[in-house]
Image (spheres, grey):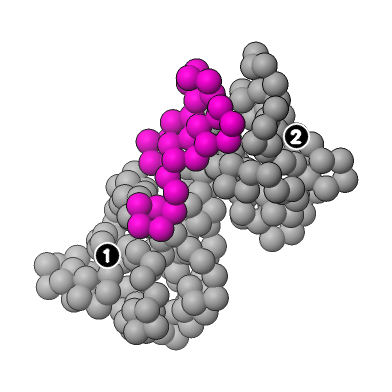
Amino acid sequence: MRILLIEDDQDVARHVSRGLKESGHVVDIAENGIDGFSLATEENYDVLVIDRMLPRLDGLTLIENLRSRNNLTPVLILSALGELEDRIIGLRAGGDDYLPKPFAFEELLARVEALGRRTFQGSANTHLKVSELEMDVLSRKVQRAGQAISLQPREFRLLEYLMRHSGQVVTRTMLLENVWDYHFDPQTNVIDVHVSRLRSKIDRDFEYPLLQTVRGAGYMLCDSE
């Protein structure tokens, strides 16, 4: 999933962002409400994680402004204000879930992924198929020709992106921005390493390869032999 985290506490933002990325998600960060609102309206996200107390534009006003523009992206509110009345106010402002601080990252991750499932169920195909390769996005299961394939979170995200763009050339830049959340080329072989690992899992020991290298352009997941 692609997640926007709007949080002015740098330690919290760093901790949450790192954990979400390690779980295979792509994360953008905004440190104030104005920048967060701009990103939320200009880009497409699966989930927004918004701190209630933000500089320049508070979290509740930010959410109300998004809802007034018919932006229905699921929102998880983070706040040090955790009383029942505070949670009710946050939900009535347009939040979909409310998590008081301090929190365990595992709970935040579970709540974010639950909100993300609503997005997928409402708008995106959750069962992907390319030739005999199949992926269930919700259960995070992958199989080829009926044989289960175990993937690490980043490998899963990489394969999901390739499957959603099957038959198209996917460039290095596209992968860096949408799978690794890099908006620049770090000049490493991280893509080559992960593609190689993924290819060994989905192509090795099968009759024909699906993941092709397009020389000088990128990669393509082909829908035929």
Name the residue at 48% across, 52% down: 1
Instruction: Specify whether residue 45 is painted magenta.
Output: no
Q: Can residue 56 be seen in this view?
A: yes
Q: Pointer 2: what residue?
A: 212
Residue 90 falls left or right of residue 162: left
Q: What residue type is labelled 1?
A: Asp
Quadrant in the picture for residue 209 = top right
Magenta residues, start to end: 120-148
Q: Tell me the SS state at disc 1.
A: loop
Image height check: is 86 above or below 25? below
Instruction: Please name the residue shown 54% across and 70% down the image.
Output: 43
Relative to 173, does residue 4 appear above or below in the rendering? below
Is 127 covered by the magenta stretch?
yes
CB atoms of marks 1 and 2 within 8 Å: no
State the CA–CA distance, disc 1 to disc 2: 41 Å
Q: Name the residue under label 1.
A: 96
172 lies left or right of 59: right
Q: Position of residue 88 (x, y in %)?
A: 15, 71
Judge from the rendering whether residue 149 lies leftward or rightward of residue 182; answer left or right.
left
Q: Nearer the viewer, residue 81 or 35?
A: 35
Q: Residues within 10 Å of mark 2 (few under 14, many from 20)?
A: some
